[in-house]
Amino acid sequence: MKNIDPHTLRLDGIYQQKGEDRWMQRIKLPAGVLSSRQATLIADLADRFAGGRLHLTTRGSIELHDLRGHDLAELNRQLVAVGLTGRGACGGAVRGISCSTSFGPQFHACQSLARRLHRHFTGNPWFEGLPKKFKIGIEGSAENRRHLIQDVGLVFAGEREAEPLWDVWCGGGLGREPKPALLLAERVPERRLIPLIEGVLVVYRKGGEKGKRLKHLIAEIGETEFRDRLRAATPEPFDTLVRSGLGELLSPATDEEPVLVPIFAGELRADQLRRMARLADEYAGGCLAVTGNQDIAFAPTSEKNRAALQQRLNLAGPGDSLCNPAPTFRICPGSHECRMGLAPTRDIAAGILENLPAAASGLSLAISGCPNSCSQPQLADIGIVTRSLKRGPDGVREPRFDLLLGENTGLGHPLAQNIDIEDLQNRIIDVLITAINSEKTKAAS
Ligand code: SF4
């Protein structure tokens, strides 16, 4: 792969990693859902090409790391054979359609829509070569606030004559300049969504500056001008999204409560994924999902299957991440694998978890290895962004962090900036003690 420009691989979902001839393949999964057959193939590919390891992302995708250039073409052929693709998972394209409310309320509507939007936008040349990435997220409710960080965020808003309605949010994003999305339109019928999103893409493609997200364009021209341009770019409403007579879901339409398997830092072994694929076949209609918190979820097909699945997971054995419940802690690969990474995120998170009081297990945490904020620290109760590297007295460059406190409605705000690791750990303990005490006071009153 020496003669290939890494930029040309991005639209296929491939990034160059740290080191010589090391590559990452990201695989899109609409709403995070995959079949057991797809999971088994990915596990086999991980064993064959990626040292038996996989990474689950906060957008419900799966990444294979440590790939060699000469294996990429064969890997892609194998993915295509089971209906999977990395097309558009990196670079200036419509990224994987995410959903953080896996198997929760309204998930069937979210999954159906995610699959249709994935089909429409993936690999379509009209929606590639954009100034930068374009993220669409579909949510069953606004509770997780994930809609605020998407270029287009869709939140279920009820039904009219059996057609789902969606609140449409627009122009959100994290990175160095986090910006919550604005509410573009309320209760939009599902059949109008594709023309509307296409309109947003046309405005972005025409007016966006190379390397800048949609949020920058809206900041530059203002919301009123953006809405004017969107009106001009949006065709007269017409009916799209003709529903399939066979249904659109990949997973079975069960309403059983999901079973969640926490995976530390989204780091999974191929043998674990293969085992989960077998469990999905036995108890969950042959499907599983990567959640927005980098975990695995199953939707059992009956109460009996739910109990049996839970028991099989509990029997997985000590020290196995399949049975180790942990607080929600979203963790990007950081300097362990990512070229942008300034800090060893997994090591830092493990250190924080070690000192975490048991009473803090209901809180959510997230750490990102650089300001790109892939783990969405602005949406956690306690968020950590690695801000920079600073040379210490001994000449070694050490990471500096921003500590963020979560908000109920918007993005988290900084509590401390540019602090070192020791200061960070102490402040987190202070925050946790305050949060626990305030919970105790609330419970007592
Ligand atoms: S936040 Fe930064 S270090 Fe982490 S995965 Fe994203 S780009 Fe890489």
Image: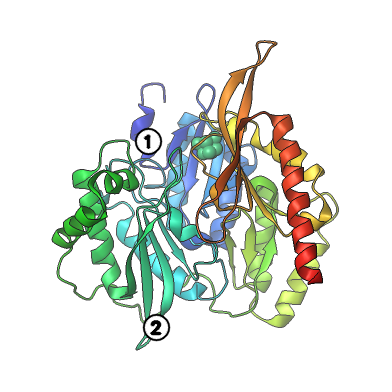
In the picture, which quadrant includes the C terminus? bottom right
| Tag 2 secondary structure | strand
| Residue 189 % position (x, y) | 31, 76
Image point (34%, 72%), residue name? 186
Q: Is residue 54 left or right of residue 140?
A: right
Residue farthest along the front direction in this orientation: 445
* Residue placed under numbered mark 2 in the picture: 159
Mark 1 belongs to which amino acid? Leu
Please tell me which residue lies in front, 213 or 405: 405
Q: How dense is the environment of label 2, judged by Cα within 10 Å: few (below 14), some, or many (20 and up)?
A: some
User: Taking the image as drawn, is residue 142 in sight?
Assistant: yes
* Residue placed under numbered mark 1 in the picture: 9
Q: Is residue 436 left or right of residue 65?
A: right
Image point (81%, 70%), residue name? 444
| Residue 252 % position (x, y) | 54, 76
Residue farthest along the bottom direction in this orientation: 161
